[in-house]
Image (spheres, rainbow, N blue to C red):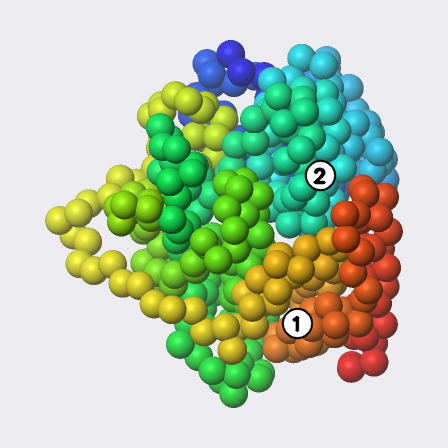
Amino acid sequence: MKRIAILGSTGSIGTQALDVVRNLPEEFSVEVLAANSNVDLFAAQVEEFRPRLAVLADESAYKKLSEKKFEGVEIAGGRQAFIDAAAVDGVDIVLTSMSGFAGLEPTLKAIACGKDIALANKETLVVAGELVIKSAQDYGVKILPVDSEHGAFFQCLQGEDSRTIEKLLLTASGGPFRGKKRADLIDVTVNEVLAHPTWNMGKKITVDSASLVNKGLEVIEAKFLYGVDYNQIQVVVHPQSIVHSMVEFRDGSVIAQLASTDMRLPIQYALTYPRRLPAPVNKLDFWKMKALTFEEPDTETFRGLKFAYEAGKTGGTLPCIFNAANEIAVNAFLRRRIKFLDIYDVIEEAMTSRAVKQNPTLEDLLAEDRATRLFAEKFIENIT
């Protein structure tokens, strides 16, 4: 039985990971659950799975949770408790499914304790890829990708020599505005942005999908996961979201991974690797599948992807700046403080204004994340 910790258990990935556990109760023991502030859902999860440790990062939410009694469960609260939850003894694998920069410190702490990582928090590699990969190598830790696209690459490369990779073909659905131009997006609403055509995801990642920032984050993530150059990563718009990604090898062969649009599949594969076990997902019916189409992304309209390539190629603290500015901008958009296209302006202003430091330490990245967030907030105040 594999002993797991789920950080971000009340989010989209976390709740689906618990679905995987429910379907395979003989395979997993949930040792740690950690979330931010959703007290009611978290309490129900704790009641059902009875982890040894349950942590809420938000202090006020923790106080509400601590009023409840769960026999045999230790309750803790606060940001540091959330980070420490990644290092609990007796855990084999840590699923990092929280959103944003907040995933970096707990991931590094889990790695330092020798725990394998099921990585759903792409921002960890975006802002600190070199630090994270080196740490994983130093401690002999596996990083198992949970993103559908990176899980696809991971599966396509099983048994292959990574030195024979010609190109990683990273698929993108195109989001709800595929084919639209800037003039069409001036007044799009939050609800329109959140209406993703093929995936059911959390709000932040859904906005990132619409802006193509999410695909940009995945480009940077792929560079570190698979050790390729940026010119070997090609984004391909695939509206049906059936091909989750492809690898082209130097002999011209292409291997693709296909599956239904259900995140439980890559989550389960990361948690059960290298075994494949039955999963409660819809199987593809190739008799009914009429067409699979592929397009070039429009990076002039959806500038998030272009910014990501620039940040990744420049390196240093620029990916951290890109990510922090985007997180602040998306939050402002969801709160209806700015318009959708303003997200790009916030990111561009931060990337062109903030000084870039090469070879940053963890402390440098933490400081730059804080500084960029303040910068982005001030910029938003000036344009609203």
Q: Mark 2, residues whose alpha carbon is within 10 Å: few (<14), some, or many (≥20)?
A: some
Q: Amino acid at mark 1?
A: Ile
| Residue 274 picture quarter | top left
Between 86 and 54, the residue placed more toward the observer is 86
- Residue 352, placed above or below residue 104: below
- Residue 302, placed above or below residue 231: below
Between 311 and 376, the residue placed more toward the observer is 311
Q: Position of residue 18 (x, y in %)?
A: 53, 31
Residue at 78 percent across and 61 percent down: it is 356
Q: Mark number for residue 359?
A: none
| Residue 114 picture quarter | top right
- Residue 50, placed above or below residue 319: above
Cα separation between marks 1 and 2:
28 Å
Residue receiving disc 2: 131
Residue receiving disc 1: 343
- Residue 311, placed above or below residue 366: below
Secondary element at image label 1:
helix
